[in-house]
Amino acid sequence: MRHQFGMLDWSVVIVYMFVVLLIGAVVSRKQTDTRYFFLAGRTMPAWAVSLSVLATALSAATFIGAPQMAFDGDLTYLITNIGSVIAAFIIAFLFVPPIYRAGTVTIYGYLGQRYGTGARSAAGVMFLLGRLLSSGARLFMAGIGFSLMLYGETGTNELIFAVVLLGIIGTAYTIFGGIRAVIWTDALQITVMVIAALCSVWLLLRAIPVSTTEILTALQDADGVNKLRLVNTEFSLGNAYTLWAGVFAMIVVGVSTHGVDQDMAQRVMTARSPWQGGWALISSIVVGIPVILIFMVIGLLLYVFYQRPDIMGAAVPQDVIEDTRRVFPQFVLYHMPAGLRGLTMAGLIAAAMSTFDSAINAMASCLVADVYAPWRAWRGRTTDDASMPNLTGSRLAVGIMGALLTVFAIAAIYMQERGGDLLINFALGVMAFALAPLLGVFCAALFTKRGNTGSVFVAFAVGIAAVLLLQPYMLPKWLDVAIAWPWWWVIVSPLCFGVCVLGTPKNNATQPEGCET
């Protein structure tokens, strides 16, 4: 059964891509120097920052992964938002003000003020490695739908071509527009994503030939499983979506992913004040909850559409779901009408681009400010600011990061196929290698006077090793225990904090204002 992605659909997608590239070109005229390229002069309105953070947080992991999770399971993934909301308030009041006042190009410049240039560069390298893994996984997910759109299948070669094409498009407009282009295009992209999702829900409700009440009844007893379950009170370290993980573990995860990840924090630092940045962060997470719910509802409706022929009757679909990773893109391509099909696939591309553009801009800022400038300053014995490259050099860094991220996305194709984990679990789990150690070190810097460059290096090494040892394939079989990804942060971040504070303060680092919050 071949999908019909016709001229009208392609026209919608092409117009969308053209508008995104146009925004990048228009915004590029306002670039003046490297700091403006990466911080937008700290002039961005809070509402735009909020939409940008929301767009990046959702990404293709939500667009494709959330429907897959609801299709295969239930709604317990939503419980993670409890901890995320609490984490947002912690970041807004305890992390954003002192880091914003530090005035550095990246948040890791704060660690440089506390512990010295070596710690700043080490944190930058940690972020680069972690973001390559995490955003590479997300770009790969977007490639699933894009590959279906181009070829009607998701073979390895087709996925690779789709990923490369998405990488080229995302790099093109980010090179010219910088963080301003990222934020304004993200505002457009989250709008397209939500419209596409709402249209999908409407179409599925029309396609299923029973009332909403009957659909809910069927979901409450789906082969003996309640797919409408929101709360799992079971205490199990091996389940990422229990009440306990959602309330406790996800606070630590949320502070890490939104507070010490340059990809997320960079947008907050472009706001006009630390309080506006904090408000933007909190509002993005609160608004994100109903958006995630919409995509989970799509997954539940797709379950009825594909898996309940007793309900569908004569309207039962002819195509078969062989891989639940592609359940939502497959529905879009085979069952949506022309035009709406193009809009929804544009939404998928928007989900991919909103993650890709912000990631390569954040990585480029880190490469330039935390790795290249300190190295150049060390060689020339000048200040870091004097060693910052010009605007052309910053754009070159964006291009390099775009190429590297595309390569890692291709590697993620093979990694996920080998592991076979759910897409959302895969995307979130790989983040722990960098972000869990970074959170421990940042807490030491913000809330104590302890630590030095050496203890930062040791904390990072211990953190990476600890996350690796917690992987399912590393735990001894005789332990007969599995530890889900949210609990990795709960174990590793305090461990890294403890290692970092073992170091005695050195005279070559300063104590920035606000670190004793």
Image: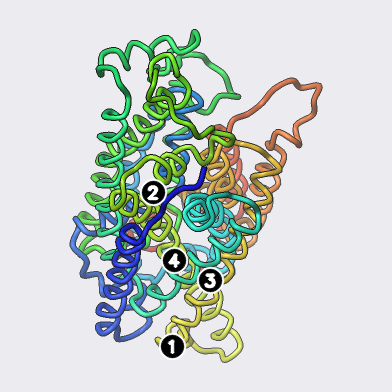
Q: Quadrant of residue 405?
A: bottom right
Residue type of the residue flagged with mark 1: Thr
- N-terminal of the two: label 4 or label 2? 2
Determine whether 101 is above or below 470 in the image: below
- N-terminal of the two: label 1 or label 3? 1
Residue bearing mark 3: 401
Q: Position of 185 compared to 117: left or right?
A: left
Residue bearing mark 4: 362
How crowded pointer 4 is (Cα within 10 Å; few <14, some 14-19, many 20+) is rated as many
Residue bearing mark 1: 392
Identify the residue at image location x=42%, y=39%.
331
Q: What is the tally of numbered marks visible in this picture?
A: 4
Q: How is colour applied across the structure in the image?
A: rainbow
The location of residue 257, given as percent across then percent down, is 45, 48
Q: CA distance from mark 4 to mark 3?
A: 9 Å
The location of residue 226, given as percent across then percent down, is 43, 13
Residue type of the residue flagged with mark 4: Ala
Residue bearing mark 2: 57
Identify the residue at image location x=41%, y=22%.
304
- N-terminal of the two: label 4 or label 1? 4
Q: Which of the two residues, 47 or 319, is positioned nearer the viewer here? A: 319
